[in-house]
Amino acid sequence: MDMQERTVDNLVIGSGAAGFAAALRLLQLGEKDTVLATEDVKAGTSRNTGSDKQTYYKLSLAGEEPDSVRRMARDLFSCQCVDGDTALVEAALSARSFFRLSELGVPFPSTEYDECMGYRTDHDASCRATSAGPYTSRMMTEALEKEAGRQSLEILDRRQLLKLLTADGRVYGALFLLTDRKESEEPRAELIWADNVILATGAPAGMYKDSVYPTSQIGASGAAFEAGAAGKNLTEWQFGLASKSPRWNVSGTYMQVLPRFVSTDENGGDEREFLSDFYKDRRKELGNIFLKGYQWPFDAEKVSGGSSVIDLLVYRETVIRKRRVFLDFTENPGKQDIDFKDLPEEASQYLERAGAAFGKPIDRLEKMNHPAAAFYLEHGVDLHTRRLEIALCAQHNNGGLSGSADWETSVHHLFAVGEVNGSHGVTRPGGTALNAGQCGALRAAECIRLRHLHEGTAAAGGGKDCKAIQKQLRQQALDFLMLPLHCSGAHSVAEVWKEASERMSRCGGIIRGENGLQQALEKTQGLLRHFTDVSAKPDDWQTAAWFRLRDMLVSQCVYLSAMLDYCRHGAGARGSALYLNADDEGKTGDIMEWQHCRTDHGAHGGLIQEVILNADNFTADCTWRPARPIPETDYFFENQWRAYRERWNQNG
């Protein structure tokens, strides 16, 4: 396979909102030798996902409600397993990052006097959330991409990341497979040497079968783990109700309009409203459906008598009973009129205030949020006439790669921004991911620029041993490219992927047990240790998928290791998952047993689990450390002004 090479100062990998932001910040700071490489500039989560009104979480910028940087930092820090220094950075850069997006053309709404008002989102004690509509992250990405064109950012499209090249705990570059070749051309690869690499590849979304991530979002976390980067809080995902086709979160207004939940057999027969089998109190049932809008992600704290029972009921229907579940917006629950004044107070007042205390769910949806209904119509589903099939799906990874307050990983000069970075804790407020991606991009760019100001640039590491290191890494890259040629198995990529993703949804979803995790981990480790013996030799056009599958399995190995270690530490249900006792594993979905499994109650909330992969045998070392506290800061102006000038080499 032909392999071309080039050298740059800074390499950004990924073309979502975080990746474009990082590249633009580098250019803004004077780092002109910066390129962005991406597998597909039009793919990924930022550009292809959303919800009823996709949320961006920011500092409060309207009204009289008090807020401050440190107050926001404390709220983020209280989400459990959050490092205080990153929480402070995300709060401090919140307004700056938000206003930049506004200036670039993202239409965040404001009052007629230009106050940027907000609303309350999930896990949010204030009203910091805002939205530009269902496509907020797409608008962000498109605005940033447009600015990248104005700044003449070099974009290398159709580059699939295969391997990060590291030596002695430092990154030196990355190996890519070029996927834009013509049918008559041989496969080609590209090795890009870089002084700094910013990874903005999103979460390893391909791990789960039940997923609301766009199919174009695969992630490349396996490459980072094999390079020696530590994972952080990998047990912490967000799972929520989502439509299967198109893949879309049914949060917010979709729940607040009180749709009818229906399950059928696999062929669409034997229809029943299964929620009412559990809820004997119609008022309680309707109240919890409404609350799923605010409380959309599955939350272990909201299982016992709370709205997350609905998630468990859907999970039981689809995973345990193998039935199909639909939302029906054409009829009220029970096919009965709703007495809106008899609803729980929060639901009654909300619907009355929105002028939507009438009619059928679709009538209320059109009144409250027409774009939410229009989205499905644009994708071939008319909610006025058709039911919407849903499942409980993986939606966001709160964990990811472990980073410093500069978003630098445990591999020197390798940064992680966006969802691939695990800056979030257990119960992050909705929309913090978009804020964190923009803040992390700026922070990483500033760290790189400051190093170059103080130490000078040295592309691909520099130094007297650089050529010898590059020679060694070049051979590693060539050997890695040849791996598919050694395959002698009988199983196709599609076959292995299907089995592995189903296993992950079953064992590493919202219901987890030590035995199931152990079995899943052993199966995944066995696949990786004998991957060329198990997988069939791919033809040239399947090579890219073969490498994607291998990367996904590496990610599964590390994530399952983290979940199993969490179990063995005696930790209980929290955040996104319930952890069963061994005696309860394998039972057929008794909701009452799930409601009363052991809970963590914050016992591990001040501790952060980190995981490092042993790439030689695909085992993982898990360690626990205290969360870094929020730094104490001297706010005396003259002292900080002097430190700022010294930091940026300014005179005067």
Image (cartoon, rainbow, N blue to C red):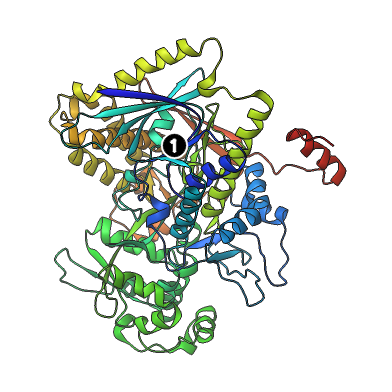
SS of the residue under disc 1? helix
- Identify the amino acid type marked 1: Ala
User: Residue visible at 28% across and 80% down?
Assistant: 384
Is the residue 399 above or below the residue 308 in the image? above
Residue 245 lies in quadrant: bottom left
Q: Position of residue 300 (x, y in %)?
A: 47, 56
Number of numbered markers: 1
Return the residue at label 1: 562
Is the residue 338 above or below the residue 321 in the image? below
Seen from the viewer's position, the closer of residues 211 and 183 is: 183
Give the quarter of the figure containing the C terminus.
top right
Q: Is residue 603 visible?
A: no
Is the residue 618 above or below the residue 392 in the image? above
Q: Is residue 200 left or right of residue 477?
A: right
Q: Position of residue 422 (x, y in %)?
A: 51, 42
Seen from the viewer's position, the closer of residues 345 and 647 is: 647
User: Residue visible at 35% across and 47% down?
Assistant: 217
Q: Is residue 441 left or right of residue 370?
A: right
Q: Position of residue 79 (x, y in %)?
A: 59, 52
User: Residue visible at 37% across and 89% down?
Assistant: 359
Q: Position of residue 208 (x, y in %)?
A: 32, 47
Q: Is residue 122 visible?
A: yes
Seen from the viewer's position, the closer of residues 485 and 300 is: 485
Seen from the viewer's position, the closer of residues 478 and 411 is: 478
Give the quarter of the figure containing the N terminus.
top left
Say few, some or many: other residues with alpha carbon within 10 Å of mark 1 (under 14 / 14 to 19 / 20 or more): many
Q: Is residue 527 left or right of residue 67?
A: left
